[in-house]
Image (spheres, grey):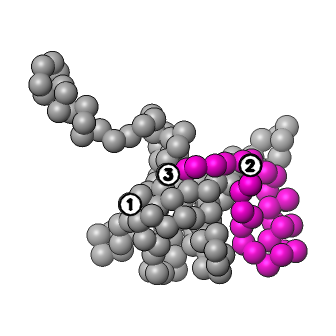
Amino acid sequence: MTGRYALHWHFMEKRRNTRLDISLPCRICSPGSGSQLLSGVTENMSRGDVLVVLEGESASAELPCVGDPLLIEIDLPSNHAFGQKCMQCQATVVRVSNAAEGPASLAMRIHKMRFQSRAEADSFARETGMPLRQVVM
């Protein structure tokens, strides 16, 4: 497209990075309480954003609001050289769709991330009683 239509299209597109369609299991909780643990599957991800479709009981749970900070732990595919890893992220909710429109989903902007072995993450959860560790960088 050229001319004024190309300019108009440019302002409509809000994505900052290329998205990859990838389904990975994940867990989500609020960094303040950490009590309500939501589970879901990523629908797509980019360098700074993630869309998660909630599953099971999480799909009907009380959903966070736009602007709420969240912690996300995404299980990564196993690798024989490195073992099972997970990506832990601090994020903010940018869009919520409720179950009335289909499966509930959360679009989140990622602010910080780190990678950790799945065994270390599970050990932390058992020792502290907190489902996810606050990401500190």
Amino acid type indicated by mark 3: Arg
For the residues labelled 1 and 3, say whether their Cβ atoms are less than 8 Å apart: no
Q: Earlier in the sequence, mark 2 or mark 3?
A: 3
Return the x and y of residue 5 as percentages of the image width and height.
13, 27
Give the crowd class for mark 1: few <14, some 14-19, many >=20 residues within 10 Å.
some
Q: Which mark is residue 95?
A: 1
Distance from label 1 to label 3 (Cα)? 10 Å
In the rendered image, the vertical position of residue 110 relative to residue 121, given as above or below: above
Amino acid type of the residue that numbered disc 1 sits on in the rendered structure: Arg
Residue 22 visible in the shown view: yes
Label 2 crowd (10 A; few <14 / some 14-19 / many >=20): few
Give the secondary structure at mark 2.
loop
| C-alpha span from label 2 to label 3 | 17 Å
Is label 1 in contact with label 2 (beta carbons under 8 Å)?
Answer: no
* Percent coordinates x, y for residue 110 in the rendering: 55, 50
Disc 1 is placed on an element classified as strand
N-terminal-most mark, 1 or 2: 1
- Residue at 12%, 19% (x, y): give it: 3
Amino acid identity at mark 2:
Met
* Front position among marks 1 and 2: 2
Mark nearer the N terminus (1 vs 3):
1
Q: Is residue 74 visible?
A: no
Write down the residue under mark 2.
137
Mark 1 and mark 2: Cα distance apart in space: 26 Å
Q: Which residues are magenta?
A: 110-137
Q: Is residue 84 left or right of residue 67?
A: right
For residue 13, which quarter of the picture?
top left
Residue drawn 41% across the image and 65% down it? 66
Residue 124: numbered disc: none
Q: Residue 109 — which label?
A: 3
